[in-house]
Amino acid sequence: MSSSPDRNAPDNPPPGQGSPETGELLRLVSQGEEILERARSFRQVTDMKMRGLLRRQRSLDAYWAARPDTDPTGEAWRRTPHCLRVLLVEDHPDAAASTALLLRYFGHDVTVARDGPAALELARRRAPDVALLDIGLPKMDGCEVAR
């Protein structure tokens, strides 16, 4: 008499016919399909948002191209009006890199500082038009830098 389980017994169905492995496999396949569907949905939403951003950028580009070279007082612009000197103060490297990349894509001159004291030094040297400050910075918070 062998000690192996009887494959024909009701408690031990053959693989692929209601075995625990089949149930687990079906559950994993179902989860995989859910993940793929969420990814497709996320991609569609992201594509829609990016198309909207690009439409807005094209509208802004058209606005700046059509705008006269003088302001209402008759003074000539000193530099291209849509190119700003931006001081970006962000201690998280990925957030700083992606934000700087996006700002540069839109034609701005971007300088990045990782903390408050560095931001103040760069602001003194570069005189930015705009400063984008993270509130939770090391050494000195963004509110203190703004003051």
Image (spheres, grey):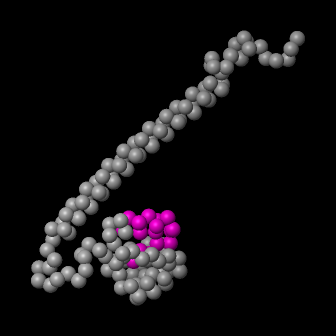
Horizontal side of 77 relative to 110 (left or right) equals left
133, 74: nearer the viewer: 74
Q: Is residue 92 left or right of residue 11?
A: left
Magenta region, residue range: 87-103
x, y (%) of residue 98?
Answer: 44, 64
Position in image of residue 100 (x %, y %): 41, 69
Q: Is residue 104 magenta?
A: no
Image location of residue 133, percent across then percent down: 41, 74
Residue drawn at 79 percent across, 17 percent down? 5
Give 65 or 23, whichever is nearer the viewer.
65
Q: Is residue 85 visible?
A: yes
Q: Does residue 123 lie above or below 30 as drawn?
A: below
Quick one: quadrant of the C terminus? bottom left
128 or 115: nearer the viewer: 128
Q: Residue at x 50, y 78 (%)?
A: 115
Quadrant of the drawing holding the N terminus: top right
Percent x, y of residue 71: 14, 79
Decide whether residue 88 is among the magenta residues.
yes
Instruction: Tell me which residue sits at (42%, 41%) in the image.
Output: 40
SS assignment for the magenta stretch, majority: helix
